[in-house]
Image (cartoon, helix red, strand yellow):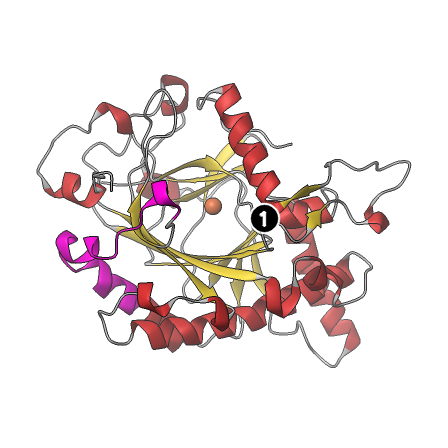
Amino acid sequence: MVEVERVENLANSGIKSIPKEYIRPKEELESINDVFQEEKKEDGPQVPTIDLQNIESEDETIREQCIEELKKAAMDWGVMHLINHGVPVDLMERVKKAGEEFFGLPVEEKEKYANDQATGKIQGYGSKLANNASGQLEWEDYFFHLVYPEDKRDLSLWPKTPSDYVEATSEYAKYLRLLATKVFKALSVGLGLEPDRLEKEVGGLEELLLQMKINYYPKCPQPELALGVEAHTDVSALTFILHNMVPGLQLFYEGKWVIAKCVPDSIVMHIGDTLEILSNGKFKSILHRGLVNKEKVRISWAVFCEPPKDKIVLKPLPEMVSAETPAKFPPRTFAQHIEHKLFRRNEQEELVPETKD
Ligand SMILES: [Fe+2]
């Protein structure tokens, strides 16, 4: 197995300046500012907050209004804070506590769970490997594993410490799966489709995969030079994110980087490339990145809801295509879509924020 540098070790080593592999290219540095200053800004566009209280209301008018707001946010931003989402707040707290306790273990303990990307063992504890000529790295370590459907999980790879990890995470995954169905339904109706359409198109209960990635961003001595996660769009259908109330997520909206403020008890939801493709671009998969800071460790828990890699060919739904709105995306499986993005990135080199198809 290749020896991988853990960012946590680097951060704890007392360095005052970061290794060059973590320094972003010059053009990108111009847009990296202090995250706490950014969070204080009151002016300019803000990530919308969507209240899901009435998403299944029996009252048609009330329900339709809720769906309309969700749809608008999906079209305009492709990312939002969900409130009244139906996931119990104490369960969210348990998931976060379990992840924090796991990452609180010494690095040597976490190494016992190390993944090995070279051999295709992608689940487990990891850090980014340099995959391009510049050797560019990101300021984070992570833990990645499949959480749903339950028969596809490999519990032997999950953290054994703390003892509540498996139960809290399993329970949380079940709630998120229900939430995903509600959102797919509402978005289908919003597009004028049958309520169960989008969920079917991404694999339904059996095939849609929920993958959890806990992102751990240590304090960074030179946060103005680094990124926790470089600019990208999510390839998923939907992504649901919890965090430890330390700001970091930035969205590229109308040509500017906008920080997502921390909304208590909310879940951040992204529309990913998969829904952008199915909706022929009506729903937006927004470019985003993660900033780091010097004062506080940031942790986020992202759950990616993804279609199966090869079983489904993703393309704009026929109802979304017309003479005026021709198909914007060629047919590709999920695996081919990922491959295509990597190829494009290598081709353009890593400097420009990735443009979409
Ligand atoms: Fe992302």
Residues in magenta, as a range: 96-120
Question: Is residue 94 part of the magenta span, yes or no?
Answer: no
Instruction: Give 155 or 287, whichever is nearer the viewer.
Output: 155
* Residue at the far bottom in the pictured view: 58
Q: Residue at x 74, y 67 (%)?
A: 196
The N terminus lies in quadrant: top left
Q: Which residue appears at 62% of the width and 49% of the height?
A: 310
Of the 4 image quadrants, the one containing the C terminus is top right
Residue 356 shown left or right of residue 108 in the figure: right
Compared with 187, 151 (above or below) is below
The residue lying toward the viewer, choosing from 168 and 80, is 168
Identify residue type, mark 1.
Gly
Residue 211 point in image, percent of width and height: 46, 58
Disc 1 target residue? 272
Which residue appears at 71% of the width and 58% of the height? 201
Residue 103 image-quadrant placement: bottom left
Q: Where's residue 154, x and y in %?
A: 39, 66
Q: Is residue 343 left or right of residue 223?
A: right
Q: Is residue 331 above or below residue 125?
A: above
Q: Position of residue 74 (x, y in %)?
A: 65, 51
Q: Which residue is depicted at the point 68% across and 59% down?
A: 69
Q: Main secondary structure of the magenta part?
A: helix
Q: Is residue 344 left or right of residue 144?
A: right
Furthest residue to the top?
26
Vertical comparison of 216 with 332: above or below: below
